[in-house]
Amino acid sequence: MDRRPHAPQGTVCSMDRLLIKLAITAATSSLLFSTPVHAQILPPQNKAQHVELTKGPELELAHDDTAIVRWSTTNPRGDDEHYGVVHYGTDPENLTQTAKGHIRLNRAHPETMFRVRMEDLKPQTTYYYKVTSEGGDGESDGVESPVNHFTTPAPGERIVIYGQPKYQPK
């Protein structure tokens, strides 16, 4: 004869049902609120065989000590991590300073816009520059602009090219 104490009838069943409900809730929650990070990272595209400048480069904005240059190219593809690179200096034959701007390529767009900020410039000074772009691995996209130039404004002034008058007080 079995002499172990027995639970009242119905108690074990309701406990089992509660555990089953908790297990189902936990499984459903993990499916609904999970973020499959690995599924969001796509492999790099094949690099474009030929990348061309489609617009610019041109000065977008300049203060007495900073400037932003922008340009567009055909989409270089390859790694999504890319950099716009500006080589610049006060002598067109000696562009020894470099500024880089990080972007992520948009795979759906046929063109890519680069914007790079140059800092620590001197007021009322002519700077010469050329632009390139490169992948996150430092490999060039194979595009390079001719040398262009701009002159930084006097202290307290700025140059705004897009949709604004050329010179404005700060």
Image (spheres, rainbow, N blue to C red):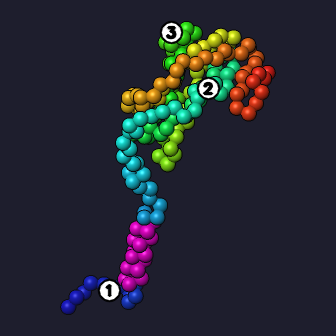
Which residue in the structure is indicated by mark 1? Answer: 6
**Magenta region includes residue 167:** no
Residue for point 67% across, 22% down: 62
Kindly identify the amino acid type of the residue bearing the numbered disc 1.
Answer: His
Kindly identify the amino acid type of the residue bearing the numbered disc 3.
Answer: Glu
Residue for point 50% across, 9% down: 94
Which quadrant: the C terminus? Answer: top right
Residue 53 drawn above or below residue 23? above
Is 61 displayed left or right of 43 in the figure?
right
Q: Name the foreground residue: 162 vs 6.
A: 162
Q: Earlier in the sequence, mark 1 or mark 2?
A: 1
Which residue in the structure is indicated by mark 3? Answer: 93
C-alpha distance separating marks 2 and 3: 19 Å
Q: Earlier in the sequence, mark 1 or mark 3?
A: 1
- Percent x, y for residue 22? 43, 72
Q: Name the foreground residue: 70 vs 52.
A: 52
Outermost residue toward the left?
Answer: 1
Which quadrant: the N terminus? Answer: bottom left
User: From where the camera sits, is residue 119 visible?
Assistant: yes
* Residue range corresponding to the magenta coloring: 12-29
